[in-house]
Image: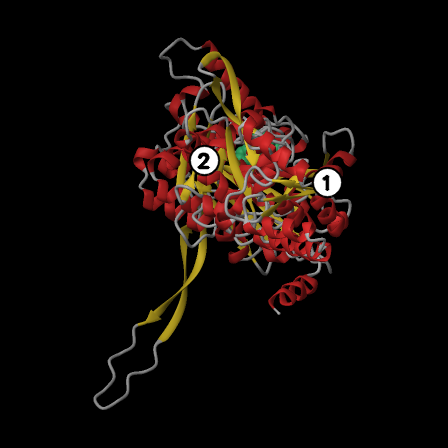
């Protein structure tokens, strides 16, 4: 027996047991090797007139025997001589494929222009192997592996055999033509693992489809089918016999071969894209958008991405895993590569294929992901551009998209503390109280009165309620629009955006200022003239005694009672100082771990022109402060109710109102 030419058996052991965590990938590795072997032969046929094989003759065959517990991967590729078997399979981490690739790259660099010699000229050749370890993954599932190979142009066949522990034997064998059979003798089943399941039609077709669907040579397998047996015509008067079925076998190509993402967009119909999306991403609806990218240059990759029509049911659960499927040279590396998508575009599904990636040894994780990050950045730009197109060219579709995924975009801004606002800000839609439809921030600004320097919004839990809120109606009455925000994330998102775009100050193009995003319920909107402010301050002062009584009656609930500058119809309103609005506190309260909430600084603002205010003054002047206290409580509670907030003590409110009715 020959010993493995590696420093220690430990390396092999380590490899089999630790590098690959996922045992089923052994088939992917063996098929990739077979694909490399046929690719090499094809390459040889292009340069060596002695080798007469056509591309159509080349194939990979997968077979199994349930009784003998074997899985076989065969190819009619380049094959290996006795020496090559020894060198390639006897030395761990020796990759002939890698050397082949390097040699071709060198040839390409040296060749004269127009001289088709290097691998780069032959885009039809695409070698997958590079580390010289993939083959050994067969020992993760096999107790013995036998490789029968005949090199092209040789009349000798040799069989390499090993149990993957100490070493291997190479002995003469028989094979009709050039190529290689790798026969894996599956390990015995254990209580935890059933290796036998690999030796089944279902098990193998599943793995081929999953990992090797886009290998560019046909992967053939004998599959069992059933057909109806032609029954003889029943004799006169006889009932026709029940239909009989028989099973038969047929060799089928299991993989689909041509990756749809490598085809030019102009050559693929939308129906084909839709079918691919629905089959591969298990959706029953067509995608809302299809984004196909073919990049050549410093980074080479193909990407095919889809925006689903509907958010998957688990989209907003913490178990949802974002990511694009990552292929390298047509072989699946990873189902969901998170690094390829930012969180806020996590709803995008799709595939990226790049032969440029430096894969680490197990191909399951990527060692140097600088390239990956560069691809991710470009994909992000593509997705953004596509969404902008949809927003501008197909507004109805965009609004549907936003209904499904707008929350994700808003979270993206909030979670990035506003950093992502340049990417996402112009994609947002909010309900305009004035225009009564969904609009973008830019559309808000375009319709704003001359000189406007802010974007106003109101947050709460229902659009109807928000539209009727005095805080909103007064701003509308002044000719400004208010964006009505009814999602829990809205106010957080607005605060994270903070400012948006910019405008010239007093017509001076040199000095630009951003538009401030302001909550009508918690910020000075800058809509009051100095005179109005002064008037309100004086009115507050002259009613100081009355307001003291009211404030005391309300205890801790309010910081101050003042005359409002913003009210038109309503008798009173509750606003908040310090940036945290009433609506936001409601959202925070509903979250788990709501303790430690920021202190609210509430202000009861009174409408000095409202008859209720007159009634309060009259009661106070008549010395009836009990009435003042009751009214203060009712006013405060009803102002909360108008904003959709439940008073602390609804019963007391109801009793006070009933009392008044008597
Ligand atoms: N079916 C095959 N036909 C011809 N040569 C093969 C076959 N399978 C393996 N080899 C040879 O054995 C070498 C080692 O294979 P192995 O799978 O361990 O590494 P690799 O394919 O080069 O790299 P990787 O670890 O990235 O898969 C290959 O480079 C190739 O030269």
Q: Position of residue 409 (x, y in %)?
A: 53, 39
**Whether the residue under disc 1 has CB within 8 Å of ligand 1:** no
Q: Residues within 10 Å of mark 2 (few under 14, many from 20)?
A: many
- Where, by quadrant of the figure, is residue 48 drawn? top left
Question: In the displayed structure, does residue 566 sit left or right of residue 89?
Answer: left
Q: Earlier in the sequence, mark 2 or mark 1?
A: 1
| Quarter of the image where the N terminus is located | top right
Q: CA distance from mark 2 to mark 1?
A: 65 Å
User: Which of the four quarters of the rendered structure image does ligand 1 lie in?
Assistant: top right
SS class, disc 1? helix
Q: Which residue is mark 2?
A: 480
Q: Is residue 497 above or below residue 616?
A: above
Q: Which residue is mark 1?
A: 18
Q: Nearer the viewer, residue 626 or 576?
A: 626
Colour pattern: secondary structure
Q: Position of residue 109 (x, y in %)?
A: 47, 12
Q: Residue at x 48, y 37 (%)?
A: 428
Q: Position of residue 595 (x, y in %)?
A: 77, 48
Q: Residue at x 38, y 17 (%)?
A: 116
Q: Nearer the viewer, residue 15 or 165?
A: 15
Question: In the displayed structure, does residue 333 sit left or right of residue 393?
Answer: right
- Where, by quadrant of the figure, is residue 446 drawn? top left
Q: Nearer the viewer, residue 29 or 94?
A: 29
SS class, disc 2? loop
């Amino acid at each position: 027996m020959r010993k493995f030419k590696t420093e220690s058996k430990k390396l092999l052991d380590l490899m089999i047991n630790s590098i690959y965590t996922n045992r089923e990938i052994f088939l992917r590795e063996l098929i990739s090797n077979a694909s490399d072997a046929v690719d090499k032969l094809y390459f040889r046929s292009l340069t060596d007139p002695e080798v007469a094989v056509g591309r159509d003759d080349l194939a990979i065959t997968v077979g199994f025997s349930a009784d003998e517990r074997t899985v076989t991967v065969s190819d009619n590729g380049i094959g290996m001589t006795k020496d090559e078997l020894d060198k390639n399979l006897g030395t761990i981490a020796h990759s002939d494929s890698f050397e082949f690739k390097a040699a071709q790259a060198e040839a390409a660099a040296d060749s004269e222009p127009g001289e088709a010699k290097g691998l780069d000229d032959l885009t039809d050749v695409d070698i997958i192997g590079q580390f010289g370890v993939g083959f050994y993954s067969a020992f993760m599932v096999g107790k013995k592996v036998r490789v029968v190979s005949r090199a092209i142009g040789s009349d000798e066949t040799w069989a390499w055999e090993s149990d993957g522990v100490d070493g291997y034997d190479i002995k003469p064998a028989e094979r009709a033509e050039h190529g290689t059979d790798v026969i894996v003798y599956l390990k015995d089943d254990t209580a935890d693992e059933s290796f036998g399941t690999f030796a089944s039609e279902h098990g193998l077709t599943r793995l081929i489809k999953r990992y090797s669907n886009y290998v560019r040579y046909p992967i053939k397998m004998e599959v069992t089918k059933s057909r109806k047996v032609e029954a003889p015509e029943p004799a006169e008067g006889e009932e026709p016999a029940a239909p009989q079925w028989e099973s038969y076998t047929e060799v089928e190509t299991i993989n689909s071969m041509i990756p749809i993402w490598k085809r030019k967009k102009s050559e693929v119909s939308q129906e084909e894209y839709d079918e691919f999306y629905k089959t591969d991403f298990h959706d029953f609806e067509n995608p809302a958008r299809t984004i196909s990218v073919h990049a050549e240059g410093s980074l080479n990759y193909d990407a095919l991405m889809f925006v689903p029509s509907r958010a998957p049911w688990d989209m907003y659960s913490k178990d949802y895993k974002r990511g694009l499927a990552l292929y390298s040279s047509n072989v699946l590396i990873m189902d969901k590569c998170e690094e390829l998508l930012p969180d806020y575009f996590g709803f995008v599904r799709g595939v990226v294929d790049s032969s440029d990636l430096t894969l680490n040894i197990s191909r399951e994780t990527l060692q140097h992901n600088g390239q990956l990050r560069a691809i991710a950045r470009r994909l992000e730009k593509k997705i953004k551009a596509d969404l902008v197109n949809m927003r501008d060219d197909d507004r109805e579709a965009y609004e549907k998209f936003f209904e499904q995924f707008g929350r994700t975009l808003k979270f993206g801004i909030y979670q990035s503390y506003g950093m992502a606002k340049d990417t996402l800000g112009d994609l947002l839609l909010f309900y305009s109280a004035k225009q009564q439809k969904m609009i973008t921030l830019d559309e808000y600004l375009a319709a704003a009165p001359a000189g406007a320097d802010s974007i106003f919004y109101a947050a709460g839990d229902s659009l109807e309620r928000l539209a009727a809120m005095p805080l909103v109606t007064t701003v509308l009455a002044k000719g400004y629009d208010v964006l009505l925000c009814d999602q829990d994330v809205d106010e957080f998102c607005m605060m994270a955006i903070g400012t948006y775009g910019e405008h010239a100050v007093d017509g001076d193009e040199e000095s630009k200022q951003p538009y401030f995003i302001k909550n009508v319920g918690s910020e000075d909107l800058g809509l009051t003239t100095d005179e109005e402010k002064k008037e309100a301050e004086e009115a507050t002062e002259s009613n100081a005694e009355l307001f003291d009584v009211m404030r005391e009656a309300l205890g801790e609930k309010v910081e101050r009672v003042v005359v409002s500058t913003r009210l038109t119809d309503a008798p009173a309103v509750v606003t908040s100082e310090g940036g945290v609005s009433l609506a936001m506190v409601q959202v925070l309260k509903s979250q788990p771990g709501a303790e430690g909430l920021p202190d609210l600084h509430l202000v009861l603002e009174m409408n000095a022109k409202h008859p209720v205010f007159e009634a309060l003054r009259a009661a106070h002047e008549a010395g009836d402060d009990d009435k003042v206290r009751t009214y203060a409580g009712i006013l405060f509670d009803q102002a909360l109710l108008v904003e959709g907030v439940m008073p602390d003590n609804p019963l007391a409110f109801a009793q006070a109102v009933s009392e008044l009715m008597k």
